[in-house]
Image (cartoon, rainbow, N blue to C red):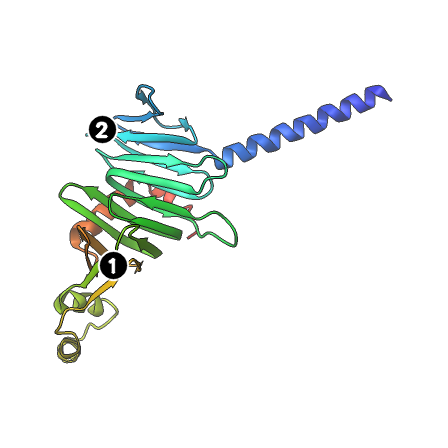
Amino acid sequence: MHHINFKLIQIFCFIGIFASGSSFAAESIEIVRSSGKVAIKQDDQKERTVGSKSILPTRHTLVTGPNGRAVVRVGEAGYIVVEKNSTIEIDRAKGHVNFFRQVTGMIYYAVKAIKGDQRKFEVRTSTATIGIRGTRFLVADMPDRNEIGMRKGLISVTNPDKDFEIHRKAEQDEFEAFKQEGKDAIAEENRNFEEYKAKSEREFVEYKREFTLEANRMVSFDGQRVDDRPLSGETQKDMETLEAYGKEWLDKVSD
């Protein structure tokens, strides 16, 4: 009888270890693809090089060099694609919100849809806090370029200190987005443009602490000023480059 009980204990221990290991694997932060220089730092420790298949601590700073790039799986929540010359702090410590602080550079985020009481994600930049519940977008936070470009989904953008001064782009750029919705006949485009222009000749300015950003649009920041407009060619190209680099894994995200 004692022998049987001991065997049962062994079996249950094995099941517990297996389940714990599976949970750890599902929630771990892992580099699934990398090239060039990729490293992490923890607190005051020295920077150490990491690469593909590296399991990263729940709290760390990831750094890419001038030729570095990485695709990082953030548990079951999704992936980030980190471009060269970028720095991001990641904190998934137990009990904390899923938190990123993009210090500098360019990063593509692909986060699966969050349901019910699941913890939402936050991305903080030098300008704003971005709330995520399932979306794909690009953040560039560099000395000469500070913007968010949306591929899919919806995000909330908050200024923790004061209101944003939100400007809508001029009507011609707006009409370019309007045409993309299937208005291809030249005569119809010209007629619709005149009607559209008459309604939108003046620039709209709003003052808000928080606003939402939808698919195929972008905002650029200059101090408190925010310019809201359709995706630029440059941002579109950057998105496509990082999407191509991480395609194998981004295709797995259900957002």
| Residue 25 point in image, percent of width and height | 50, 33
- Horizontal side of residue 187 vs 92, given as left or right: left
Q: Amino acid at mark 2?
A: Gly
Marked residue nearer the N-terminal end (2 or 1)? 2
Task: Give the number of the disc on residue 65.
Answer: 2
Q: Quadrant of residue 198?
A: bottom left
**For numbered disc 2, what is the local secondary structure?**
loop
Point 28% across, 50% down: residue: 161
Find numbered disc 1 in the image and state the secondary structure of the residue it sits on: strand
Observer-nearest of 129 and 36: 129
**Would residue 94 appear left or right of 48 to someone viewing this image?**
right
Q: Position of residue 18 (x, y in %)?
A: 61, 30
Relative placement, left or right, of 128 versus 189 is right
In the image, 8 versus 57, the foreground residue is 57
Image mark for residue 217:
1
Whether residue 240 can be seen here = no
Residue 44 in the image: x percent, y percent?
Answer: 33, 21
Task: Identify residue type, mark 1.
Answer: Arg
Q: Residue at x 22, y 28 (%)?
A: 65
Residue 217: quadrant of the picture? bottom left
Q: Which mark is residue 125?
A: none
Q: Give the vertical position of 108 relative to 29 (above or below).
A: below
Task: State whether residue 250 is above or below residue 30.
Answer: below
Above or below, 16 against 183 in this view is above
